[in-house]
Image: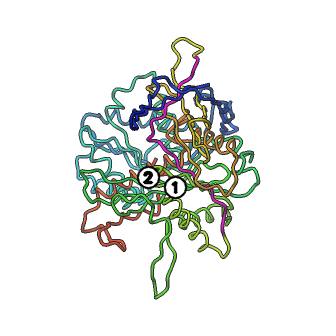
Amino acid sequence: MVKAMLKEKQIVKGKYEKQISEMCTSVDARVLPSPMIKYNETGKESQVAPVGGKWTMNDKILYKGATVDKWTCLNLSGSLKQQVMDQFCKDLISVCVGMGMKFNLEPVIPNTYTGKQLDEVLSEINRNAENNLELLLVILPDHDPETYGKIKTICETELGIVSQCFKPVKIMTLERSKKKLYLENVGLKINLKAGGRNSVLLDAISKRIPILTDKGEPTIIFGADVTHPSSREGSTPSIAAVVASMDWPEVTYYKGVVSTQGPGEEIITGLYTQYVEDNKIKPFGMIRELLKSYYRLNNQQKPKRIIFYRDGVCETQFANVLLHEMKAIKLACATLELGYQPKVTFVVVLKRHKTRLFPVHHNLPGESLNVMPGTVVDTKICHPCQFDFYLCSHPGEKGTSRPMHYHVLQDENHFTADELQNLANSLCYTHARGGTTSVSLVPPVSYADLAAHRARYYMKETPKSESGLSSAPQIAMLPKIHEKVMDTMFYC
């Protein structure tokens, strides 16, 4: 049993006044079990059952450790000495190797400090590494927040280098007791960017997750989001991002694509489009591109089912978004093969709402006042006719936890409530940035948000004279992501 706090305004109709109670509404809730997490068999502990949404990397080896042979470190901080930087790199690589990565202990070119122009030094490093640099570690400047975006833009759109940035103040002030945990979390991000897998769901590789893996039919999970320009950015285009899982049945590796559209447009116009070439109409779009990548990376298998998580849609836009984006998904599928129409489950994830959940009883003094990870509510405060539920999948250690509101707009796969709730909860234990903690939002939606915000840096760093134009003259196109990084999770 949990209490749901619904903040409402007082309503006055004629001479009758409706009083809103100051007491919370009591609703029935369930706590979903935590999924079993699978690591590599070579570790002392290859499986773990999270407790309270958390676990550790102790005695565990990454499910698939990436190989990084050619790397180097660039120090842009004036306060961080060369000796400190070199020791930090050694400590980081030692932790990565201890987790199961294959890491060259020595940089391909010496770690350097530079005061030169950023584009010049990055190009020079790439040339010295014979254009084969696999990972660039960057210590950011002490006081220049714009440098991060410049580095990501140059590395990911011009040079084709995967990078990992660090704040110098973090390195210098890191407590010894917290250093290993920090390096482990960074190592998990590097492993994923370099093509490895941190961990997987045991039920996923055992093909026991209903709809997703149980029938042995390839399934793809999409996540989509749109970020809009702030008031200071004027008529800058909105940026849409779509990610899709590429490694069925593990569903831990998501490729991302981005595109621009009109400022303030919420419907993703780039899901499916057409263009004319040689007097012929040819199909194009983000859904088609991701499905083709899935086909290429999964032994020429096309997914038979699609689960599409959509972020950033308010309730008044449900019908419009479903109409246009569901149509785009169907059209994109139809252009790949005659008669190809996989079943689609379309789910909107609402984050910006006022509903909060609190447990009725607390068993231990001093414990968090938030509900336990896995708490789900699907009655009383949900829609009386439609398929929706609230899920709090993360451990709330600070502040008040905000549950995610999942609203199913269309379900051709015929999920039961239990199946879809357990799937969302389980996916929240596979986030790359979550480290060894479950997160509040399903990874595909979170990754799409990260990819869209990364593309915003590209837009800022691309000169107006160099930014191309789409079919709408006023909408500037994003620079193309380099082929060396486009198949990686560079946006993490």
Looking at marks 2 and 1 on the same chain, the residue that comes earlier in the sequence is marked by 1
| SS assignment at label 1 | strand
Q: Which residue is mark 1?
A: 243
Does 446 appear in magenta? no
Q: Residue at x 33, y 51 (%)?
A: 151
Q: Residue at x 32, y 57 (%)?
A: 124
Q: Which mark is residue 451?
A: 2
Q: Where's residue 131, x and y in %? A: 41, 60
Q: Residue at x 49, y 57 (%)?
A: 242
Q: Where's residue 91, x and y in %? A: 45, 33
Question: Which image quadrant for residue 379?
Answer: top right
| SS assignment at label 2 | helix
Q: Residues within 10 Å of mark 2 (few under 14, many from 20)?
A: many
Q: Is residue 245 visible?
A: no
Q: Which of the two residues, 104 or 492, is positioned nearer the viewer here?
A: 492
Q: Is residue 253 above or below residue 351?
A: below
Q: Residue at x 51, y 52 (%)?
A: 310
Relative to 258, is 142 on the left or the right? left
Q: Is residue 340 above or below residue 92?
A: below
Q: Which mark is residue 180?
A: none
Residue type at the position of mark 2? Ala
Q: Residues within 10 Å of mark 1 (few under 14, many from 20)?
A: many
